Image (spheres, helix red, strand yellow):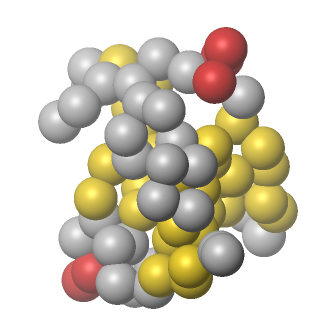
Amino acid sequence: MLNLCGHLHPVAVVGRGADRLRLPCFSYCKTSERLALPAYGRLTGGHPCSPGERIWLVAEGAIVDWPQSSRQLDRP
């Protein structure tokens, strides 16, 4: 059973150090069968996704799959 969640406010941290972006994203956790929906407001903060989650970035009006193999997560 798929669970939809809108309260986690997932973000993907793309890049490293001072050259990084925090982008809203959809995230899917296979273990808990949870699809977390992104938040778009600047006041919602954002919770960085766990390394094992499947992620779709939201940027410039597009939704883009971000494969696990191309990620370099840098926790703030």
Q: Quadrant of the C terminus?
A: top left
Up-down relation of residue 64 to residue 4 (above or below): above
Up-down relation of residue 57 to residue 26 (above or below): above
Residue 67 percent across, percent down from the top left: 72, 28
Give me the residue at 47% from left, 82% from top: 5
Residue 43 percent across, percent down from the top left: 24, 83
* Image quarter of residue 51: top left
Q: Quadrant of the N terminus?
A: bottom right
Q: Would you say 14 lies left or right of 55 here? A: left
Residue 54 visible (yes or no): yes
Residue 25 visible (yes or no): no
Residue 65 percent across, percent down from the top left: 78, 44
Residue 41 percent across, percent down from the top left: 40, 85
Give me the residue at 47% from left, 59% from top: 32
Give me the residue at 73% from left, 62% from top: 60
Q: Would you say 4 lies left or right of 61 here? A: left
Q: Depth check: give the residue in front, 14 or 33.
A: 33
Up-down relation of residue 15 to residue 52 (above or below): above
* Image quarter of residue 28: bottom right
